[in-house]
Amino acid sequence: MLQCARDKRRRRVTSTFAALNLADLVSGYLHIFQYWLDIRLVSERAGDQKKRIEKDKGRKEPPPGPDDEDFRRPARPAGRAIAVYSAKGGVGVTTLATNLAVGLHTEETPAVLVDSCLQFGDVSVFLNLQVKNSIADLSARAEELDNDVVDEVLMTHECGLRVLAAPQRPEMADDVHADQVRKVLQFLKRVFAYVIIDTSSTMDDTTLAVLDVADLLVAVATPDIPAIKDARLLFDLLNVLEFPAGHVLFVLNKMDRRTGITAEAVAENLKHAVDGEIPYAEQTVTASVNRGVPLLLGDKSRPPARNLLDLLGAIKHKLVAQAKEEEEVKEAERPRAFGR
C-alpha cells in the first residue's frame, strides 16, 4: 500500500517536470520565432525605406534659390552623423550623446545635437534648456528647409552647441515621420561638421532612418546579462540590415569590477571588440544630469570625464579612417570614369 502511494507520487512529480520542461521548450521556440519575426519585420521596413530613397534619388531637385545657395553648396565638406544607440534602455545613451556633442563642438567644427527620441526625449533636460521649438517644427517643413528656418528652431547651449530638441509632448511625435527625420538630418550634415543623434531603444522607422544617415554608430551596453544579450541581438540585426561593421564603435558604460564581467569577456562573448569603457560613477553622473551640466564642461582630469575624452579620440580616429577609405575609393574609381 505504501509502495503504491510512493509510485503514484513519483509518477505525479515526473509528469509535472515533463510538463514544465515541455512548457519551457515551447516558450523557447516561441521566443526564437518571435525574434526571427522581429528581424524580418525590421529588415522589410529597411528595404522599403531604401527603395523610397532610391526613388527620391532619381528625381531631379529644383535649382536652389538665392536665399539657400550657401546651404545647398556649403563651403565645408559634408559633415559626419554619429548615432548613439542601445537596444536596452537605461544604459546611459543620452548621457553619452550629450557629452560627445559638447566634446566635438568647436568654432572650427560646429556640432548639432539631435534628439530623435520623439516621445520622451531628454536631451534638453540634460543640457538645462527650455524647449520652445522642436524637431516637429523642422519635419513639418522638411521639403523647404533653409538657413532662417533652421536657425530659428535650433536652440543654442552656453558652450555654443546647437540643439534640436524632441517634441514637447508625446502625442506630437505622431506628426513626425521617418522620411522627414532623414531629410532634416541630411540637411544638417550639409551645415554642421558633426551631427550627433540621441536615439530611443526602439528599432522603429525613425531609428532606421537615423541609421541610414549615420556615418558612425556608437553602440552602448552595460556589463549585465540583459544588456549584453540585447547587444548580441543588435549586432545580428545590423548584419541583416547590412550596416558596415567597420562603422560601429562598441562602448561599455557603467563598468564596475564588482559585477565580475570584464570587457574582455564581453568582447569574447559577442565576437566584437570593445572600443571604449566608461567607469561606473553614479553619484557624479547623477549630479551632472540633475544640474544640467555635462561632465565634459567640468573637471576633465578625473573619471568618467577622462574616459569620455578617450572615447572622443577613438571616434575622431574612426571618422578620419573612414574619410581616408572613401577618398581612396574615389581615387580608384576616377581613372575608370575617365576611361569610359
Image (cartoon, helix red, strand yellow):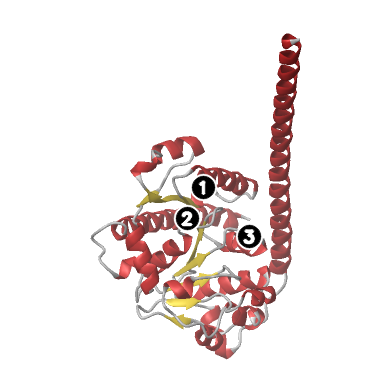
Instruction: Name which residue lies at 61% across and 84% down.
Output: 64
Query: Can residue 33 be seen?
Result: yes
Q: Are the two marked residues, 2 and 1, in contact with CB atoms closer than 8 angstroms?
A: yes
Task: Give coordinates of residue 75: x percent, y percent.
Answer: 45, 77
How would you rate the neighbour count of disc 3 (Cα within 10 Å): few for under 14, some for 14-19, many for 20 or more? many
Query: Residue at the front extreme?
Result: 1
Task: Give coordinates of residue 3: x percent, y percent.
Answer: 72, 9
Q: Which residue is mark 2?
A: 91
Q: Which mark is residue 33?
A: none
Amino acid, disc 1:
Ala
How would you rate the neighbour count of disc 2 (Cα within 10 Å): few for under 14, some for 14-19, many for 20 or more? many
> Which image quadrant: the N terminus?
top right
Number of numbered discs? 3
Q: Are the two marked residues, 3 and 1, in contact with CB atoms closer than 8 angstroms?
A: no
Q: For residue 120, what is the image quadrant?
A: bottom right
Considering only order in the chain, which callout, 1 or 2, is on the residue closer to the N terminus? 2
Q: Which residue is mark 3?
A: 208
Amino acid, disc 2:
Val
> Which image quadrant: the C terminus?
bottom right
Amino acid, disc 3:
Leu
CA separation in Å, label 3 and label 1: 20 Å
In depth, the one of 220 and 47 nearer the eye is 220
Instruction: Name which residue lies at 63% across and 78% down.
Output: 139
In depth, the one of 76 and 85 nearer the eye is 85
Q: Which mark is residue 227?
A: 1
